[in-house]
Amino acid sequence: MAAVKSKSAALRARLSHPIIDSDGHLLEFLPVLTEYVQKAGGAGAVKDFRVGFRTAYLNFDWYRQSAQERRELWSRRPPFYMVPARNTLDLASGLFPQLLHERMDEFGFDYAVLYPTMGLHPPMFAGEEIRRIGCRALNDYYADLFGEFGDRMTPAAIIPMHTPREALEELDYAVTKRGLKVVMLPNYVKRPIAAAAKYPEAARYAFRLDTYGIDSEYDYDPVWRRCEELGVVPTFHSPGEGWGSRTSISNFVYNHIGHFAAAGEATAKSLFMGGVTRRFPKLKFLFLEGGVGWGRSLLCDLVGHWEKRNVREVVKYDPRAVDRARLSELHQRYGGKLFRAAVVGQEAAQFGTNVEDPAMIDEFAACAIESKQDLRDRFVPSFYFGCEADDPVTAAAFDATRNPFGARLNAVFGSDIGHFDVPDMSAVAAEAYELVEHGLITEDDFRDFVFVNPARLWTAVNPDFFKGTAVASAVASLASQKAA
């Protein structure tokens, strides 16, 4: 294709640094993907794979149900119209890596990490056999499809997390055997609640989210350790629809707003409170498409809760500390008619406690927080937040005046090309730069957003991540500046 000038290309020509896209999306080509599924699991696996989509997330049954059935079953409205269908060139660019590769300069991108579309869901399939077949087939598909275009782009492997064993086996296969250097994990695993399993018809509505840090079914430390050994960053990109408040039976937009943020917050909070960032301080964790607003809020909430509920402070609220004689005296002086004389001597009876074990009150024990600075050191360097071009809240990441500790949070640019959010792939970089044009961030902030933060993220446990790519020299220069 002939080179096409665009605002994004013009922007890139003015910049002195690369633009790294840390969250574009590829579109799987179903006729070819089906061959990979069949190769991995046989003819029957193709049918099971399709059924998996209907039950894992997309809820296709909604379209066959009457309004009354949707209400009786409380059947969540599923996504629809999710790809750039009207822009055929962009649609084809999501399908065919060669075309995408040819258009990278038009987009103003020097390098792109590409996440799946259909592949977002197989790691969450309920059945182990088809879950593992689906992940294996997709990872083979991605490795074969993108192998010759590694100078400008790389796909993300999908890793199931129902058990550490599943995760470790697919990590080793995808990274060591297929050479994939980005991995995507589900934010959570839906676990059944044992008491609800006695009632099969109700069981699908009663589940809990296993987010790998606190209250987990398994010890996931071997997974984080293996990620570190393999030099891959755990990244998370799962829908948050279908639980919490996002279960509308009629409105997809209602379900969609904030769902990635909800999933990211659940996982990040769990990893932090479970002490994962304490035990693996070199490892970075990336949460995609939810923006940075929830990360800022989570950090503020952690600080506020630790100040009031750390093990030294929370004892001040122990009901047994109530001065019963003083409360009785105040009751007699100020209680009035509403507080009847019949309760004299029993004023403090309601202030009891069932918490007898001292270990139960230290809820920050796993992350071993001794000071607010520990909070900063185990949150800010460890967590990265994928932000889309049209999200003005991204500016909050660089607002050191208002952020706790004067921190600059690790926002990284994610284009979301390939999905409905992006009607014109060639306009995304220019749209992201509007944060500068509108005075929300500085040129230096923008450089951190699209280059410095992504470069440091992807090289954190793999210094050679960008070796042989179009940005190798720029990243090496950045690393030498940091060393100096």
Image (cartoon, helix red, strand yellow):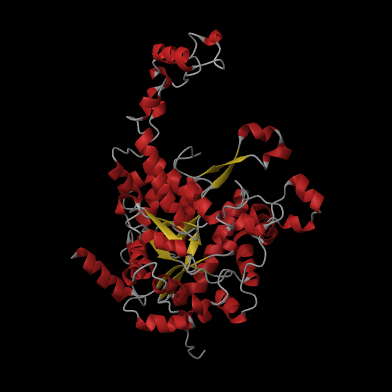
Instruction: Answer yes or no: is residue 160 visible.
Output: no
Q: Is residue 349 left or right of residue 275?
A: right
In the orientation shown, which residue stands out farthest toward the left?
A: 484
Quadrant assignment for the C terminus: bottom left
Q: Residue at x 47, y 12 (%)?
A: 332
Vertical comparison of 372 with 170: above or below: above
Instruction: Answer yes or no: is residue 146 visible.
Output: yes
For this rendering, which residue is in front, 324 or 195?
324
Image location (x, y in percent) of residue 63: 76, 59
For this rendering, which residue is in front, 184 or 207?
207
For this rendering, which residue is in front, 210 or 79?
79
Image location (x, y in percent) of residue 269: 44, 45
Vertical comparison of 141 with 294: above or below: below
Q: Is residue 108 left or right of residue 342?
A: left
Q: Is residue 247 left or right of residue 353?
A: right
How many numbered marks are there?
0
Vertical comparison of 396 with 267: above or below: below
Q: Residue at x 39, y 14 (%)?
A: 326
Query: In which quarter of the view is residue 398 placed?
Result: bottom left
Q: Residue at x 59, y 78 (%)?
A: 92
For this rendering, which residue is in front, 317 or 197?
317
Q: Is residue 394 left or right of residue 45?
A: left
Q: Residue at x 22, y 68 (%)?
A: 481
Image location (x, y in percent) of residue 318: 40, 23
Vertical comparison of 198 with 267: above or below: above
Image location (x, y in percent) of residue 118: 60, 63
Query: In which quarter of the view is residue 208 placed?
Result: top right
